[in-house]
Image (cartoon, grey):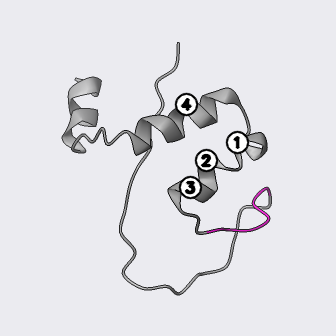
């Protein structure tokens, strides 16, 4: 069993730094509709499920991670 976390942030500017991870070939800023219209490009059905969970509006504060590790 695995637990996955998806983190949300807000950008303070639109300056993109260099991509250091070699497995990342590009970054894209997509709308929800654009992401879900590209399901065939997702790594797996689990990735699609994670997007669906995020877009459902479920949100938790970061202190939930501390509670999990206690």
Residue at left 71%, top 32%? 44
The answer to whether mark 1 and mark 3 are in CB contact below 8 A is no
58 w.r.t. 26: above or below: above
29 w.r.t. 66: above or below: below
Residue 20, given in percent of the width and then of the height, sits at: 70, 69
Q: Earlier in the sequence, mark 1 or mark 4?
A: 1
The residues bearing labels 2 and 4 have C-alpha atoms spaced at a distance of 11 Å
Residue 60, given in percent of the width and then of the height, sits at: 24, 40
18 w.r.t. 65: above or below: below
Instruction: Quickly name the residue at label 4.
Output: 49
Instruction: Quickly name the residue at label 1.
Output: 39
Instruction: Quickly name the residue at label 2.
Output: 36
The residues bearing labels 1 and 4 have C-alpha atoms spaced at a distance of 10 Å
Residue at left 71%, top 49%? 38
- Callout 1: few (<14), some (14-19), or many (20+) C-alpha neighbours within 10 Å? some
Q: Which residues are magenta?
A: 23-28
Instruction: Quickly name the residue at label 3.
Output: 33
Residue at left 61%, top 53%? 35
Query: In the visual, does 44 lie left or right of 2?
Result: right
Q: Earlier in the sequence, mark 1 or mark 3?
A: 3
Q: Earlier in the sequence, mark 2 or mark 4?
A: 2
The residues bearing labels 1 and 3 have C-alpha atoms spaced at a distance of 10 Å
The residues bearing labels 2 and 3 have C-alpha atoms spaced at a distance of 5 Å
The answer to whether mark 2 and mark 3 are in CB contact below 8 A is yes
Identify the secondary structure beneath mark 1. Answer: helix
């Amino acid at each position: 069993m695995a637990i996955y976390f998806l983190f949300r942030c807000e950008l303070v500017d639109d300056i993109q730094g260099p991509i250091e991870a070699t497995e990342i070939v590009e970054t894209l800023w997509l709308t929800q509709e654009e992401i879900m219209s590209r399901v065939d490009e997702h790594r797996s059905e689990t990735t699609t499920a994670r997007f669906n969970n995020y877009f459902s509006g479920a949100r938790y504060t970061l202190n939930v991670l501390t509670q999990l590790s206690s």
